[in-house]
Image (cartoon, grey):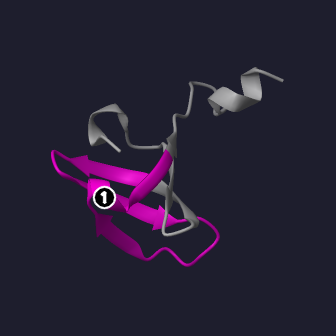
Amino acid sequence: MRLASIRPGDIVRVDGSLAEVVAKAPDRLTIRWAGRPTNLRTIGARSVEVAWHRLSGGQHEDEQER
C-alpha cells in the first residue's frame, strides 16, 4: 500500500486489526489501535493491509454508498 494517499484521521487495517492514523511522516504512520488503550505505534507501508478515508462530517466513503 502507498502511504501517499493516507491522511491523519483515516482508518487502516494493520496485522488484522483496525487503527486510526494519528500522524504521518514521509515513510511512516503513527497509529492508535481501535478499541484498545491509547498506545501509539509507528508503522511502515508494508504493515498497512487496507485503508479507508474519512470524509468531512465523520462519515466513511462506504457509508455514503448505502
Q: What span is colored magenta in the figure?
A: 21-50
Disc 1 is placed on an element classified as helix
- Horizontal side of residue 25 vs 36, given as left or right: left
Q: Quadrant of residue 7?
A: top left
Q: Residue 54, position in %: x, y?
A: 55, 34
Q: Residue at x 36, y 62 (%)?
A: 47
Q: If the image is split into quadrants, where does the N terminus sit?
A: top left
In this rendering, would 56 be left or right of 31?
right
Q: Which one is nearer the viewer's eye here, 35 or 50?
A: 50
Which corner quadrant of the image does residue 18 belong to? bottom right
Report the label total: 1
- Residue under pointer 1: 46
Q: Residue at x 35, y 32 (%)?
A: 5
Q: Where is residue 37? Give x, y as percent.
A: 55, 78
Tell me which residue sits at (49%, 69%) in the image: 15
Outermost residue, right direction?
66
Quadrant where the image shows the C terminus: top right
Residue 27 covered by magenta stretch? yes
- Using the image, determine if residue 15 lies above or below residue 64: below
The amino acid marked with disc number 1 is Arg
